[in-house]
């Protein structure tokens, strides 16, 4: 059973539909202790990084304990940014710190519009379990103003004014800046890959 965490940051309905199409069985944990029976954990989210303040304390502790047990963790959009140490968007709110680095605002130079909304291509610098079957230059759907830096954990990058991490992966921790639930067949394939990792 994959736990889909509801911390008030929206888009759970579309994420649920995407995972349903990927053949997953989901639960929405009511309390952090519910994560003890999860085979995988998904942290979705849209909007301001400040919304992740709701994950501080007991939720963060429970997620860290689950990851230490080997439970796969998947951050989507704002949820991926939360995997890092923090964001300039809400400097007083700590991230999980599973990935080194801070999220910053996309540069608004040369006529580039921010937020970055719409389809864009992935660059695949290395192999990835999460992105298995996803080819170079696959188009996925983004909507965001802040992004994570390109670090060794980047399983895919994208460019919008500057290059940023579009997907990250280290051991059994995964994240995507784009919305797989809105990215057609490629997005469902990515969700299926996470479901397989959580089995």
Image (tube, helix red, strand yellow):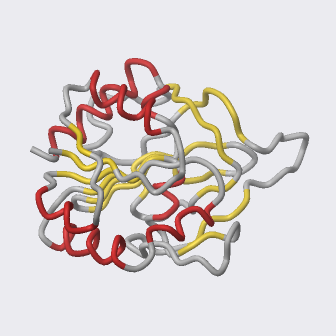
Q: Position of residue 94 (x, y in %)?
A: 53, 78
Quarter of the view holding residue 69:
bottom left
Q: Residue at 66% of width from left, 45% of height from top?
A: 144
Q: Residue at 11% of width from left, 57% of height from top?
A: 37
Q: Position of residue 132 (x, y in %)?
A: 26, 35
Q: Position of residue 65 (x, y in %)?
A: 21, 75
- Nearer-the-camera pick, 198 or 99: 198
- Describe residue 161's horizontal placement relative to residue 196 as left or right: right
How many numbered badges does the structure rendering display?
0
- Describe residue 90's horizontal placement relative to residue 138 as left or right: right
* Quarter the N terminus occupies: top left
Q: Residue furthest right?
A: 111
Quarter of the view holding residue 120:
top right
Using the image, determine if residue 47 lies above or below residue 192. Answer: below
Q: Position of residue 123 (x, y in %)?
A: 49, 39
- Describe residue 91's horizontal placement relative to residue 63 as left or right: right
Q: Residue furthest front?
A: 30
Using the image, determine if residue 155 lies above or below residue 84. Answer: above
- Nearer-the-camera pick, 149 or 24: 24
Q: Residue furthest top?
A: 185
* Quarter the C terminus occupies: top left
């Amino acid at each position: 059973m994959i736990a889909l965490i509801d911390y008030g940051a929206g888009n759970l309905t579309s994420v649920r539909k995407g995972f349903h199409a990927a053949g997953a069985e989901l639960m929405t944990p009511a309390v952090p202790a519910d994560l003890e029976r999860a085979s995988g954990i998904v942290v979705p989210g849209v909007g301001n990084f400040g919304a992740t303040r709701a994950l501080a304390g007991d939720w963060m502790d429970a997620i860290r304990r689950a990851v230490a047990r080997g439970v796969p963790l998947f951050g989507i959009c704002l949820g991926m940014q939360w995997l890092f140490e923090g964001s300039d968007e809400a400097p007083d709110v700590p991230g999980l710190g599973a990935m080194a680095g801070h999220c910053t605002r996309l540069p608004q130079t040369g006529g580039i519009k921010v937020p970055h909304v719409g389809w864009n291509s992935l660059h695949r610098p290395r192999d990835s379990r999460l992105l298995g079957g996803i080819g170079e230059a696959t188009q996925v759907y983004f909507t965001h103003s802040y992004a994570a830096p390109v670090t060794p954990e980047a399983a895919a990058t994208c460019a919008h004014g500057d290059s940023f991490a579009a997907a990250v992966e280290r051991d059994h921790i995964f994240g995507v800046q784009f919305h797989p639930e809105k990215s057609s067949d490629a997005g469902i394939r990515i969700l299926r890959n996470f479901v397989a990792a959580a089995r």
